[in-house]
Image: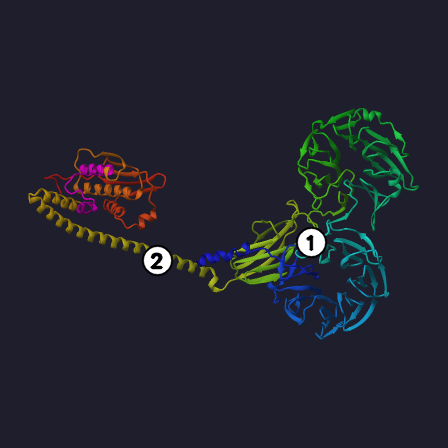
Amino acid sequence: MKFLLTLLLVFAPVCSAAIEMQHLNAVTQDNNNNIYLSSHNGVYRYDGHHYLNLATVSSLPKKWTSDAIYQDEILYIAYNNGQVWQLDLGDYSAKPIIQQSALRLAATRSHLYALTNKGVVVMDIRTGLQAKVLDNKARIFSLSANESHAYALTNDGVYLLNGDRISLLTQAQVTHGELAATTWGAAYYINDTLFSYSHKHNHAIKNDTIKELNNLTFAAPHYLYFTERGYIQEMEMSTLSYTRRNINSAPGAYKRLFVDSQSNLWGLNTNRFEVFSGDMSLERLDIGSVYNVMANIKGQAWVGTTKGVYLKTPQGFQPHTDINAAIGPGAFSVTTLLEFADQAIIATNKGAYAYDLATGVTLQLFSGYVISAHVLNGALYLATDNSGIQIFNASLAALDSTTLNSGLPEGAVWSVRQHQDDLYVATDKGLVIRDSAGSRTALVDVVPVADTAQLGNEIYAATYGNGLFRLHANKWEAVVSPLFINELNVHGDTLYLSTNHGIHTLTANHDHTELLKGTGEHAFTPGSILEVGNTITAASNQGVLTVLMRGPNAGLNPQISYVRSENKTILNPAQVRIEYDRWLDIALTDYDFATKPDVQYQYRINNGTWHNIPTPLIQLNKLGTGYYELDWRVAVNEDSWSPSHSFQFIVDAPWYRTKTAFLAYAGIAGALVIFCIVYVMQWIQSFHRVFRSHQTQMQREGLSEAVMKLNEGKQLCASGDENMLCEGLVKLDEAMCRLYPIANTDASLGSSSLHDGITNLQTYCLTEAALETHFDVTLGVERLAPQLQQDIYSVLYHAIKNVEQHAKASRIDVQVNKVGQSIQVKVSDNGIGCRRLSRKTDFGLGHYVMGQVAKHYNTKLVFSSNRRRGTRVKLAFPLILEQRQGQAG
């Protein structure tokens, strides 16, 4: 039992349930990048990978918290049980400091402010002295503070708090509002008007166009975030103008917004904490456009949609009224936007148009359906639906393209590219390659071809339905990729594939593509990617998506977040000395909260073999005492591992957990096991002895009764009366019934020969036992010694009785054969078999007598049993002949 308990304790960390935070309320961050989350079961520390309840490393209560803030290495926590606690993040000592329930907390460098149901409690952080302010207000909506000033929004305006001194900044009858302290002042929302107040200039600007503002949050140096009808908006603080709209992909009900030290924007709701910006951001285009393209025209982002041309501005997406009016009336779909010869080229389903950026005049170049447009060698190439390729020079004059189109198949042209002085034309009937020798076709069997690109020295062709192909050694070979590809773009040593399900990448010398993380839910069309580099900007079916690209291992700086054992948890350790523990968890983190590729982790102990782990948590079990050096490393892919990091720890053990003590425990346990086995065997044998003694007593009683029955039967038969004779025969039959089991208890032959005894056994099997019987007996003409005959018969008798009573068999085979200088005895059946434990614990004499006979002749009793094949008993007797008179004894 103790051993099983030890196993359970060893595997306890593996089997333990995941942390479940209940009802999130607030979020804050310290100077070491740890994020703290207030919840209904305490405060959790989050390092980007692991959640750890601070109640496990301190004396903090594991109870309902309503707010948590960080200030100067101190974490202040408001509990709903009527207390405000402080936690020193240096030594993790905790204590209550305010004996009141607080709804919200704020802190400057000198004072802590706690919003209660009856005003604001102000505590001097240095002295601990407390005072109450604003306790005469009907309602206090919000409380916030920066390094030097605190602000409160009440029913009659906004107040500036400096310790227990207060002053009115803005007087108003407030029915609803929000407040957020900023670096230079405060931003506050009063009755559908947003104000940005500068304490230095004692002046506020306002914006009264915002409706239903919630979760007002400041992000240094000059941004405000808030939710408007569930969508997160970004605004420049000094002008109160929008910089980004609808940052979240879908509206949500958030309790708080939070911007971390890496400028990642987070949303906090009841049970979820999610990041919206960082490596990826989305500016939603809510005009119902299914396909969107994008281009940079004179430094400004233009977006082409199925509903016209739009300009991307800080205030959102604005329609380009001049172009839309010139191409209209009616909706049109933009397929390509590009800048050419001081003109903005707009390719649409209605034709190609040139918009003069200087005069604002729009000119139609072509009236058919244009699928894509490209600039090659200073000329504009239009790929059309049914008019082949149309070419224009820098003056927008049409050039003759008859020769080029004569080599093209009928149908749509998807794109025109130039690689290695050759022209590659992608069509819906294959790829046409035109060089100095003329035109030739390729990939005819895998049409249509959407686009081509050159990566290194190799040409790639994208098809719409059959994936990506690579021209290698003058042969097109398939590359593992999405089947439907719309466009190819190259930057550096990476090929970017635009698809209906995200942007995929292919690096040189790789044979498969990978999905760019975060783009899988977006659809991209030809001409949708604006920029490729450290940042990818592209127009998807949802809006403008920006993805920050990271190189291999970029930003990966793994370190130990905490070490957790059975007895204690140590946060951010440099070196650890612990007593013996059954398990040790070492949590790794890089404090990178933004979206990034999946990271792989490896660790090794004492310069041993590197081990892969699926998550940044190293779990060590059954550690012996001694000094350990742990190395770990990370990688975005296995080809580029980061430099290894080291951590040393020492495991000490008390005397009762040393190796010597465990050897002693093992020895004692082994001795106890042996003692138990011997004791049980002796106990079973004692039952055998009692049973045999009881059988002997029963034999004696039965023999006495049989003699009495014989005398009675003899007298009755001798009387001469027929009735008495009949009764006498009955008495004799009863006597025989008593004598038969007694006579056969030792399987005695009496004066009969072994041959006669075997014949009787065969008759018994056929009649009494009702078994299908097969006897094979070859003993020869020589007469065996009487004792040998008796012992052979005894083995046969008990084997047959076991078959009858226990085997549930329908057939028995008996073989008694003289083979050389031995007598081979074998009894087998087709019954259910007999387990070894049953043979040891059963109190019958059969197996015991056969074992004693084998022991007497110094031979081996072979007993095999199987539920499917029945039971077999084999015994080899030495050949001992009867000594005749005159022979030496």
Bounds of the magenta segment = 737-766
Q: Where residue 675 is drawn, which disc sits there?
A: 2
Residue 750 drawn in magenta: yes
Q: Which residue is mark 1?
A: 274
Q: Magenta: predominant secondary structure element? A: helix
Quarter the C terminus occupies: top left
Say which element carries label 2. Answer: helix
Quarter the N terminus occupies: bottom left
The three-letter amino acid code for the residue at tag 2 is Phe
Q: Residue at x 21, y 38 (%)?
A: 758
Q: Does residue 566 lie above or below 426 as drawn?
A: below
In this rendered view, identify the residue nearer to me: 419 or 28. 28
How far across and how far down the image is residue 199, in percent? 83, 66
How far across and how far down the image is residue 741, in percent? 20, 46
In this rendered view, identify the residue nearer to me: 558 or 315. 315
Q: Colour scheme of this structure image?
A: rainbow
Q: Does residue 470 lie above or below 111 as drawn?
A: above
Distance, label 2 to label 1, CA atoms, is 62 Å
